[in-house]
Image: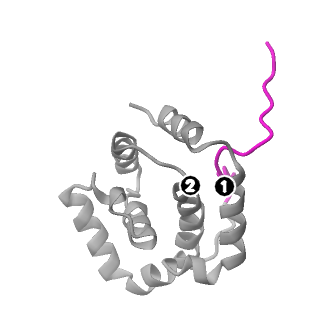
Amino acid sequence: GPLLLLTTPLAHFALTLATARDADPARWLQAKLLIAASFFTHISCSTDSLARLWALRRTQKPRDTGIFFCLALALRDTRFIRAARPCDWLHFLLSSLRHPICLLRGLRFRRDQPEAWAWLLAQTRASPTAAARTTILTKQIPT
């Protein structure tokens, strides 16, 4: 069949065969927040799409719903935690109490990585319209 070439990025992502992460979990949190925050800064995501993202992240082993709480704190946007259940709140609070320094260092991603933050914002801003990005995001989330 015909090939389709998209010359602009629709989102930033990575699929690795092996990890190059060091032992510092705060750096990993910063990397996740750099990508997620730059993406969500430029799109308008529906409540339904965020609820489906929550459901998907709850099924992961280990559960990775803490990113939504971190996004809500970093971007000062409560829409990321509207779909949180009491068990999600408990999981995040216990994790935060267990690793408070990691959380605080992770939330400083913009200050610690200003060049990467500026570059990601510029790349995301230059990509297709917000409506197209939201449609793509919604279609990629299983129902």
* Amino acid at the residue labelled 1: Arg
Q: Residue at x 26, y 60 (%)?
A: 88
State the image coordinates of residue 141 (x, y, percent, origin top left): 46, 37
Q: The C terminus is located in which quarter?
A: top left
Give the label on residue 60, or none: none
Q: The N terminus is located in which quarter?
A: top right
Mark 2 surroundings within 10 Å by alpha-carbon count, few (fewer than 14), some (14 through 19), many (20 or more): some
Residue 89 falls left or right of residue 31: left
Question: Which quarter of the figure has residue 53?
Answer: top left
* Residue occupied by mark 2: 42
* Amino acid at the residue labelled 2: His
Q: Considering the numbered disc 1 on the image, is that residue within a helix, a strand or a loop?
A: helix
Q: Residue at x 27, y 55 (%)?
A: 82
State the image coordinates of residue 10 (x, y, percent, origin top left): 66, 43
Residues at circles 2 and 1 in contact by the CB criterion of under 8 Å: yes
Residue 111 counted in the magenta span: no
Per the picture, the main secondary structure of the magenta-coloured stretch is loop
Instruction: Identify whether 67 is placed above or below 30.
Output: above
Residue 4 counted in the magenta span: yes
Q: Residue at x 38, y 64 (%)?
A: 77
Looking at the rendering, the stretch of residues picked out in magenta corresponds to 1-18
Residue 63 falls left or right of residue 133: left
* Residue occupied by mark 1: 125
Q: Residue at x 71, y 52 (%)?
A: 126
Q: Tell me the distance, in whole angstroms, between the alpha carbons under discs 2 and 1.
A: 7 Å
49 or 87: nearer the eye?
49
Question: Which quarter of the figure has residue 110?
Answer: bottom right
Residue 48 falls left or right of residue 34: left
Instruction: Identify whether 104 is placed above or below 43.
Output: below
State the image coordinates of residue 123 (x, y, percent, origin top left): 72, 57
